[in-house]
């Protein structure tokens, strides 16, 4: 029997990481980069962590690092070195080129390997993705100190039960993630519904790398948002700020403004939020149209965020009180 977690032949590691088989063999035999297990048939079997190591080492060697100096570093050390390399590269860019990096914490080594493989092969709609934290499981995530303040939380679970759902929401609130994505194999419907109500993107596996890419794209500002930098505090589409209850209250307030701006703006936000949610649901149901729905979700979310800013301006002008923060459970989205 092979060890638990070792399931990839070297050809699969090559396909997932983009590193030729011959190179992987050299890294293993000359530099001890991997320590594969053996199957009953004496075949080498590699783990998800080995796939991730190969992806990280590939990027670092392409950036100029010698394989002999990094081959035996841990996955965490390799990822930290890559983050430093990416940060240094951005510091040397011309001042006119703004940083559009998305920072992400990933729960699940296998998922981190998938993201690294997908990102390097398909890109991220012109954005650069930076995995700042790789956490083995939810237990490790609950005890971790995330000093880099990543913007996105990506979680991969086999079972999505009540305790896991509660811990995910606690992580999102504790670390102030702007967006969270959860992938699972088996889960309770009420837990899935509660996470979606909290604004978390939840999808059931199996999910292809291309579909995962579109899901990540759906929470990003697209190129259409580049001209609105005054409200674009990051490259991520901000979560909803105002609940349906708040929007209904604003829409029904009597106004001295002849054009009834508060009502119109509040109704537009509500409609855009509904279409944003609709696009997310279509994204999960129609794989062939996933790219279109990811784009529509980003467009509607970006527009919704802009109109929320407009609502704040209108409310200030009309002396309409708005809540400072939105209770996540009350978004209705």
Image (tube, helix red, strand yellow):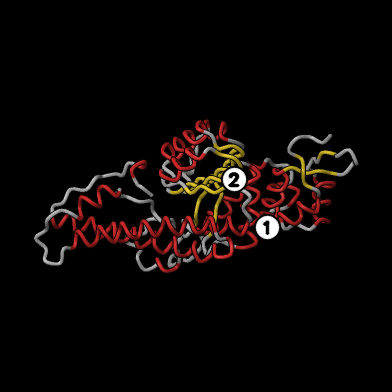
The quadrant of the rendering that contains the N terminus is: top right
Q: Nearer the viewer, residue 173 or 69?
A: 173
Check the image and name the residue furthest to the right.
41
Which residue is at 49% across, 54% downward?
102
| Residue 19 position within the rendered picture, expressed as x and y whole percent measured from the top left | 75, 57
10 Å crowding of disc 1: few (<14), some (14-19), many (20+):
few
Neighbourhood count class around disc 2 (C-alpha, 10 Å): few under 14, some 14–19, many 20 upward: some
Location of residue 70 in the rendering, given as x and y in whole percent from the top left corner = 71, 46
Secondary structure beneath label 2: helix
Q: Which residue lies furthest to the left in this view?
A: 256
Instruction: Find residue 266 and name its label.
Output: none
**C-alpha span from label 1 to label 2:** 16 Å
- The structure residue drawn at horizontal position 56% and vertical position 34%, both measured from the top left corner, is 138
The quadrant holding residue 261 is: bottom left
* Residue 141 image-quadrant placement: top right
Q: Nearer the viewer, residue 253 or 5?
A: 253
Q: Which of marks 1 and 2 is in front?
A: 2
Determine which of the numbered discs, if any, sits on residue 80 in the image: 2
Residue 64: numbered disc: 1
Instruction: List x then y, in percent, for residue 173.
Output: 41, 38
User: What number of labels is visible?
Assistant: 2
Residue at 28% over, 58% down:
309
120 w.r.t. 201: above or below: below
């Amino acid at each position: 029997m092979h060890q638990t977690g070792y399931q990839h032949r070297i050809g699969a590691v090559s396909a997932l990481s983009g590193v030729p088989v011959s190179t992987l063999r050299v890294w293993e035999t000359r530099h001890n980069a991997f320590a594969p297990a053996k199957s009953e048939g004496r075949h080498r079997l590699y783990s998800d962590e080995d796939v991730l190591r190969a992806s990280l080492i590939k990027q670092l060697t392409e950036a100029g690092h010698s394989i002999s100096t990094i081959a035996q570093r841990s996955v965490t050390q390799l990822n930290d070195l890559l983050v430093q390399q990416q940060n240094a590269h951005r510091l040397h860019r011309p001042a006119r080129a703004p940083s559009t990096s998305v920072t992400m914490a990933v729960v699940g080594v296998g998922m981190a390997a998938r993201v690294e493989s997908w990102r390097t092969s398909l890109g991220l709609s012109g954005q650069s993705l930076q995995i700042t934290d790789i956490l083995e499981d939810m237990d490790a995530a609950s005890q971790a100190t995330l000093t880099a303040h990543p913007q996105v939380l990506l979680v991969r679970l086999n079972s999505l039960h009540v305790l896991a759902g509660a811990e995910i929401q606690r992580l999102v609130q504790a670390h102030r993630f702007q967006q969270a994505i959860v992938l699972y194999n088996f889960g309770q419907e009420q837990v899935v519904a509660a996470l979606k109500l909290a604004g978390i993107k939840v999808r059931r596996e199996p999910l292809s790398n291309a579909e995962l890419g579109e899901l990540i794209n759906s929470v990003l500002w697209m190129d259409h948002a580049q001209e609105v930098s005054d409200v674009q505090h990051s490259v991520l589409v901000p979560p909803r700020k105002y609940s349906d209850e708040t929007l209904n209250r604003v829409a029904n307030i009597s106004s001295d403004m002849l054009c009834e701006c508060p009502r119109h703006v509040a109704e537009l936000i509500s409609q855009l939020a509904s279409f944003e949610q609709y696009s997310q649901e279509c994204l999960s149901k129609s794989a062939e149209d996933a790219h279109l729905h990811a784009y529509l979700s980003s467009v509607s979310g970006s527009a919704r965020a802009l109109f929320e800013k407009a609502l704040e301006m209108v409310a200030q002008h009309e002396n309409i009180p708005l809540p400072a923060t939105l209770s996540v459970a009350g978004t209705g989205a």
